[in-house]
Structures are given as C-alpha cells and as structure tokens.
Amino acid sequence: MRIDKNQLGDTNKKGITEHNERFDFLGYTLTKKGKDVNAIIKKLQDFQVAIPSWALGAGGTRFGRFGFQGEPSSLELKIDDVGLIHSLTQTAGAISLHIPWDVPTDYNAIKDLANSHNILFDAVNSNTFQDQKNAKESYKFGSLSNTSKASREQAIAHNIEVIKIGDKLGSKSLTVWLADGSNFPGQTNFQSAFQNTEDSLKDIYKTLPEDWKMFIEYKPYEPNFYSTVIQDWGTSFMLANACGDKAYTLVDLGHHLPNTNIEQIVSTLMLKGKLGGFHFNDSKYGDDDLTVGSVKPYALFLIFNALVYGMENNPQNPYPAWMIDASHNIKDPLEDLIQSLEAIQEAHAKALLVDQELLTEAQLNHDVVKCQEILQDAYRTDVRPLLEKARLNRGGALSPIDAYRSLKVRESLIKERGANSVASGL
C-alpha cells in the first residue's frame, strides 16, 4: 500500500481552515516575542528520525507476545511500512536495520525500494544478545566480553559483517549494544570483562570505513540483573575514547535508572564531542520502551533543550543520529510510531522556543525563578500548528493519526498481508 498526494490532500481539506486560524494566531504571538517562525519551521522540516526495522511489528515482554494483524513479514514490507509513516509525518526519512534479522538478498532492489519512498539507511545494528541458528559458539555468558576467545572472535566477526552489509546499503554507522553481564556475585571478573570488551571493540573499530561512526550503547540492567558490562554513559564514554575519534556514546532514554538526569548526560557528552546517537522512547519503571512522551513529556522537553543548545554551541560534536527504539505490545505499531514522532517534534519545537540568551542571563544572575519561567513559558506553548505547517510544507498529513485511520491503512495492510502475517526478528 502507498499513500498518494491526492489522498492526503483530501484528508487535509477537512481541517485546513482551523489549522490556518491556529497557525496565524501562534505565528503572530511568536513573532511579537522576537521568534523567527519560518526558521523554526525549517528546522522541524529538516529533522528526520530513523525507524528501526524491529519496531514495525508488535513487541512483547519476557512473558509473551501478542501479535498484530498485517505485520510486515519481510524487509521489503518493513521498508514499505516506513514509507507509509514517512508519507504521513514527513519525519521518518530513514530506516535502521537489525542484523541478522534483516539481511537483504538483493541490495540494489532494496536500495531502489527505499529510494522510491525517499528513505535512507541509518545505523546498522549488530545482534550478539541471542544465539543464532547454526552458530558454533554461544553468547550465553557474553559476547565481546566473554572469557571464551572463540565466542569473542565470533561476535567480532559478526559486527564486521554487519559493517559490510551496511556499507553496501549506504549506511554510515554501526550501533553496538551488548547484553553482556552477570546475574550473580562472583560470576564475572569485572576488570577482565571490561578489558575484553574494550579489546573487542577496538578490533571492530579498525575495520570501520573512513567516513563511518561507531555508536556504543549502554544499559544498567537486563537481561542480566547483577551487572552489565557497559552499564552507564561513563563506561560507554571510556570505551569510545579508547577506540578513537570515530567512536561515540549512544544515549537511549529507557536505559537509565529512575530519576537519572539525562539532560545533564547529554550536555556533558556534547561538550566533549562524544554524543553520537539518540534512541527515543519513554519509561515508567525501567526499560519499558513506551511511546515517546507518553509518561514524561516535560523531561523529554528538558532533554531537547540540552540537545538544541548543544547543536548550536558545540561544533565539536557531530550532528546526532536520531532513532526511535520502542516496544509496543498492545498498540498498532504504526500508530505508536506516528505518536512517537509527533511527541519528538513537539519537544523539539518547544526547545527551539527557549530564549537561550535570556536564560543564560538569568543563570548568571542566579535568578532561579526566572530560569524556570523561561523554560516553562516555552513548554506551555501549543506548538502543534508549527508541526502541522512543517508537515504540510513537505506534503504530509495535517493530522497523521486521523489520516492513517480515515484512509484505513491497517485494514488495507491486513487485506494485503493477511491476519497471521508476523514481523521477522521479534
């Protein structure tokens, strides 16, 4: 299924008058405050978030998975689904593949398909947290950190193969997330595990093409519950520094203990030029990977305030790679991703409204009340008309969820693929 411009035009007509009224009022208000509305809209139009190939089917938990009808059962269908999301939101201009779940059989055909949807290939992701069929060695007790040299070499070889696959697709980065760790005291020598991981990452790093980056992700727990080898941003930062200039830390919103000050982590990494990528989701207790902005929208705004500041003031840090990494086990996966994209852009737009000069002045004067007022004035602004204008300018939907439902996208996918189609890799 594809959505054409005529279909979107018909759905947009229903709300265009109200949109124009709301946009004109907001534009007038922001202009009076000295904001360049057109510049903000341009930044929103340019902001693109990668959709991970594993998020297009229903997710699950350690206890089970509830499937969703009409899921994409092949890489081609996953790209088609990202194309549907992008046609509606105009914010999902890339797909991030997970290997070996999504290995192309015909690279030229896959690239042509993605190009037809105006989709690029973002970071490729390795998988050493599962034993693959016919694999000689096991990752039960770790991959890059394993005491077994054979297991480490197998994991290194897999990551190198992932780089080769990504290079054929035009990707420019590798994301490494490890499940390595321990469940019981005394099970692992922490220093040996760290050193093995560093040595393994260096071996992978040596094979990176000149214009590539390596993103090192971290997580405090799960699937191991006593220790994780790369448990926090500091450990990732040390490993990235040990590898070299093309290695960076990747921040996943759900990979933090409750009440962690993520905006401070972001700020520090950007100051040091080491924030490479960002995975968006939300969580209540742990790594729940809920819809972005569904639980802590103000925290997301504060993080974006740090990101916007860093992108403006830290030229030593490369432009980050943005991706959604979420698990939605009861929602329509495509609707969930659309909601996440909306929440990301909303937080982004609000952060762009923060008067950074005025905020800096208030900080220098230790005017704590003024600092809070400046942030909350931006946060309380209803920026949805800006998001709508950005989508309309690019040919997207005024209201992506409403368009998705009125065009009966899920019903069409079920008709095309059947009720029992299951996404691969989950």
Image (cartoon, rainbow, N blue to C red):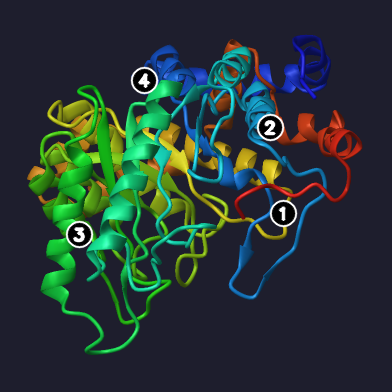
The answer to the question of whether label 4 and label 1 lie on touching residues, with beta carbons closer than 8 A, is no
Name the quarter where the N terminus is drawn. Answer: top right
In the rendered image, which residue does mark 4 sit on? 35
**What kind of residue is marked 1?**
Lys
Horizontally, residue 362 falls left or right of residue 372, namely left
In the rendered image, which residue does mark 1 sit on? 331
> Crowding at label 1, few (<14), some or many (≥20) Cα neighbours within 10 Å?
some
Q: CA distance from mark 4 to mark 2?
A: 36 Å
Q: CA distance from mark 3 to mark 2?
A: 36 Å
Q: CA distance from mark 4 to mark 1?
A: 37 Å
- From this viewpoint, which residue is outermost toward the bottom? 185
The answer to the question of whether label 4 and label 2 lie on touching residues, with beta carbons closer than 8 A, is no
Residue closest to the eye, 311 or 425: 425
In the rendered image, which residue does mark 2 sit on? 81
> Crowding at label 2, few (<14), some or many (≥20) Cα neighbours within 10 Å?
many
In the rendered image, which residue does mark 3 sit on? 197
Work out whether mark 4 precedes mark 1 in sequence or the reverse, and give the earlier one. 4
